Amino acid sequence: MKNIMHIGAYKALISYDPAIQLFRGEFLELNGGADFYAHDIEGLQREGQLSLAIFLDECAKRGISPTKTFSGKFVLRLTPEIHQAATIAAASSGLSLNQWAVAAIDKAARVGA
């Protein structure tokens, strides 16, 4: 995936903030904010490790899980035309629309992971 940095067992989305001329890292799987900033990749690694360590330590002190929980359900809104095309594609593959969508999302989410 583009712009994903692995820090420990966690993934952070990396972007550039032109307003402050720094790279920004945002942990995607944590249940709270542990963002970090730096001028370069080495700095992002260093600041990310520090931010993550502080966040995990605080979670341990409070007895809370550091990671988000996911239910496995979400609402997807499509245009009627896309809904129709997806239903036809699913049926032609011998799958329910849900099975087809899960397979398509899984494939797209794993590209470059």
Image (tube, rainbow, N blue to C red):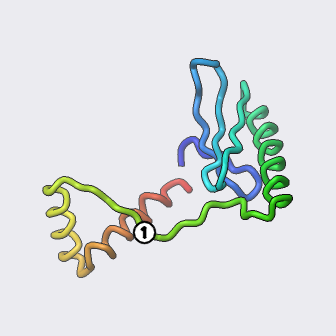
x, y percent for residue 93: 24, 76
Q: Residue at x 50, y 70 (%)?
A: 71
| Quadrant of the frame with the C terminus | bottom right
**Looking at the image, is 22 positioned above or below residue 60?**
above
Considering only vertical position in the picture, is 20 above or below 32? above
Residue at image position (65%, 55%) is 31
**Residue type at numbered disc 1:** Lys
Say whether residue 103 is left or right of residue 52.
left
How far across and down, in percent of the image, does residue 97 sit? 26, 73
**In the image, farthest residue toward the bottom:** 94
Q: Which residue is mark 1?
A: 73
Q: Viewer-proximal residue, 65 or 102?
A: 65
Q: Quadrant of residue 70?
A: bottom right
Q: Nearer the viewer, residue 21 or 31?
A: 31
Position in image of residue 61 (x %, y %): 86, 58
**Residue at figure coordinates x 62%, y 56% from the top left:** 29
* Residue in the image at 61% along x and 38% along y: 14
